[in-house]
């Protein structure tokens, strides 16, 4: 069983919050994590028709063992239960004895914020991160980009093609229909495939609208749906008063590069060697790792990217106080002068010798002119070092 990095943050949250809530995509490991973290808690799964019926007819019964601890899985199946949760935790004055999980953001998080405001610690669990996977030897990054990071791919050794085909079918049939009434599922499915071809690129809703044959309002609605179900992340542009020529559109990333690779028709890692989206998929994987770094520590990520009207671009910006910390993401294995060009431009723009990083597809570690160069599988270490202004151990 793979040890999840979020465990430490979960235990810390139980010391101060009556309720801990975990949301995330299906199959990301929420149930496994909660049962591993709290093995003695009474467990209820609202996916079970019997348990759901009990929650509707006798909700108080689910909280009778609250002093010993209770886990309610897939709580979005019966949001009214959150009002009962509020009453029970307020009456008990206990901390950390109620754990809730859910698989979509919209209704689940809105209902929690209304019913349990000030009482709940919210966590987002994405699929496995590289720092959670034991790397006895460092494989080529294409192995991970092809396979993706859903736990069952590692615990049960399921074939990625079989897993993602089933995942997509379940997603389209269950989550999409539950969250939004879409008249033509074939159009939406085409939209998902088109989004995969745009991972790592600046979002152009008008272009998607033309290719899908629907209006831009529908495109934005569908994008919100993909965000709500943890399929994509829209990375906002970095804004500052020092330069008014910065682009305003977000960049689109799939939260799991394996799903994006499957949608792009990639059937084996070797297909990535000369694929036209090789660089974007590498970038998708690294941006996903950055999001996991913060989510796994219970921190809201303040991540963005830099791009101006002349095409100068920095793939990832970490925000530390008032300082933007730039990171370039390169799928090459040779350190090039171009790696530093836009980082140095941002330094000139801000008037500061900002700490910076480069993540690339080799396994070397170097530091050049206050820029730390790290291999792809150690991106978490780079983020930690930049956040804390610490040197990196080779």
Image (cartoon, helix red, strand yellow):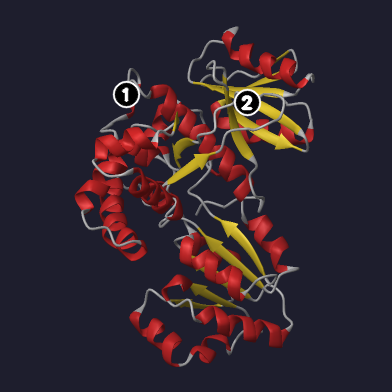
Extreme top residue here? 337
- Residue denoted by label 2: 327
Q: In the image, is residue 337 above or below residue 296?
A: above
Could you give the CA–CA distance between mark 1 and mark 2, rounded to whole angstroms? 27 Å
Q: Is residue 202 above or below residue 52?
A: above
Q: Secondary structure at mark 2?
A: strand
Which one is earlier in the sequence, the residue at label 1 or at label 2? 1
Instruction: Quadrant for the C terminus, please.
Output: top right
In this rendering, the answer to whether 367 lies above or below 238 is above
Apparent side of residue 388 relative to residue 99 in the rendered image (left or right): right
| Label 1 Cα crowd, 10 Å radius (few <14 / some 14-19 / many 20+) | few
Q: Could you say where residue 319 lies in the image, as x and y percent from the top left? A: 70, 36
Q: Residues within 10 Å of mark 2 (few under 14, many from 20)?
A: many
Residue 38 seen from this side: no
Q: Position of residue 296 (x, y in %)?
A: 61, 50
Which image quarter: residue 109? Answer: bottom right
| The one of 129 and 218 positioned closer to us in this rendering | 218
Residue 341 lies, with reference to residue 328, above or below; the image says: above
Which label sits on residue 80? none
SS at badge 1: helix
Which residue lies at the image location 42% right of the left edge and 55% below the top edge?
229
């Amino acid at each position: 069983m793979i040890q999840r990095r979020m465990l430490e943050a979960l235990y810390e949250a139980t010391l101060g919050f009556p309720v801990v809530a975990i949301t995330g995509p299906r199959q990301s490991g929420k149930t496994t994590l909660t049962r591993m973290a709290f093995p003695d808690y009474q467990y209820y799964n609202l996916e079970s028709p019997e348990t759901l019926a009990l929650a509707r007819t006798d909700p108080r019964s689910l909280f009778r063992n609250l002093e010993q601890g209770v886990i309610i899985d897939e709580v979005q199946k019966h949001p009214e239960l959150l009002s009962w949760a509020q009453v029970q935790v307020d009456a008990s004055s206990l901390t950390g004895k109620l754990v809730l999980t859910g698989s979509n953001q919209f209704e689940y998080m809105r209902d929690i914020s209304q019913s349990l405001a000030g009482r709940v610690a919210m966590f987002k669990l994405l699929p496995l991160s590289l720092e959670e996977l034991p790397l006895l030897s460092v494989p080529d990054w294409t192995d991970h980009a092809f396979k993706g990071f859903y736990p069952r791919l590692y615990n049960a050794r399921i074939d990625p093609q079989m897993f993602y085909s089933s995942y997509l079918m379940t997603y389209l049939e269950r989550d999409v229909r539950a969250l939004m009434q879409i008249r033509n599922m074939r159009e939406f499915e085409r939209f998902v495939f088109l989004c995969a071809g745009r991972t790592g690129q600046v979002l152009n809703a008008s272009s998607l609208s033309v290719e899908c044959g629907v209006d831009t309002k529908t495109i934005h609605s569908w994008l919100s749906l993909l965000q709500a179900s943890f399929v994509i992340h829209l990375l906002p542009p970095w804004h500052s008063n020092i330069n008014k020529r910065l682009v305003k559109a977000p960049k689109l990333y799939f939260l799991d590069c394996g799903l994006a690779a499957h949608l792009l028709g990639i059937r084996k890692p070797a297909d990535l060697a000369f694929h036209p989206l090789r660089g974007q998929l590498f970038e998708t994987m690294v941006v996903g790792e950055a999001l996991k770094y913060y989510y796994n520590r219970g921190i809201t990520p303040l991540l963005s990217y830099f791009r101006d009207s002349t095409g100068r671009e920095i793939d990832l910006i970490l925000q530390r106080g008032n300082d933007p910390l730039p990171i370039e993401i390169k799928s090459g294995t040779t350190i090039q002068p171009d790696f530093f060009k836009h980082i140095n431009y941002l330094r000139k723009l801000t008037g500061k010798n900002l700490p910076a990083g480069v993540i690339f597809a080799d396994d070397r570690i170097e530091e050049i002119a206050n820029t730390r160069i790290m291999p792809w599988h150690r991106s978490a270490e780079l983020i930690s070092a930049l956040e804390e202004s610490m040197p990196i151990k080779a």
